[in-house]
Image: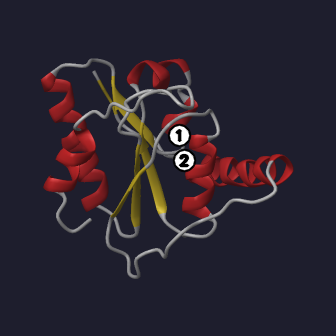
Amino acid sequence: MLLPPRKQAILERLYAWYGRRLLRSSFARLWIHGAMPNGTQPLIAVANHSGWWDPIVAVYLSHEPFRRDQYGIMEGKQLLRYPFFRRVGGFGVTGPGPTETRALVDLAARVLETGSNRMLWVFPQGALLPAGAGLRFMSGAARLARRCTDA
């Protein structure tokens, strides 16, 4: 089953504000290496997922330094457990089959192509894994990059 985002701007801003406060009180620094591309073309951010901080960091980076309209792909069972994330741009599917994967890539492409200044966070491991765990990536990020050639 496809679980599309149901963004609410006020909740997204509140979550970014809360994330900024939480990050500042818990970390000495957040380092960003390299430069963001100029312009408003769609952007796909691919990151490993080893801690519960990851969505907080993604929303914070999207709002504060990058100034992007952010979305993120999440595991469907986690979206059902934490439906709040759909309100801040999370979306996903509940099944692992090829039909669900195609539907997810189609939705991700529409999200990137139907707005300006969009940023999509993809965690290609497909799940939260402990730090140091062997990395095994799902193919969705590569499929999305091939499909969205402007991103």
Rendered location of residue 107, percent (x, y): 25, 43
Query: Nearest the camera: 36 or 70?
Result: 36
Question: How many numbered marks does the figure carry?
Answer: 2
- Label 1 element class: helix
Which disc, if any, is residue 87?
1
What residue is drawn where x is 19% and y is 59%? 148
Q: Counting other residues with Cα less than 10 Å from the Cα at mark 2, is it few (<14), some (14-19), or many (20 or more)?
A: few
Q: Along the horizontal axis of the image, is 72 left or right of 17?
A: left
The kind of residue tagged 1 is Arg
Cα separation, mark 1 vs mark 2, equals 5 Å
Rendered location of residue 111, percent (x, y): 31, 52
Dividing the picture into quadrants, the one containing residue 17 is bottom right
Residue 115 position (above or below residue 99): below
Query: Nearest the camera: 74 or 25?
Result: 25
- Label 2 element class: loop
What residue is drawn where x is 54% and y is 68%? 33
Residue 66 position (above or below residue 145): below
Which disc, if any, is residue 8?
2
What residue is drawn where x is 27% and y is 45%? 141
What residue is drawn where x is 41% and y is 40%? 123
Q: Does the CB distance between marks 1 and 2 fall below 8 Å?
A: yes
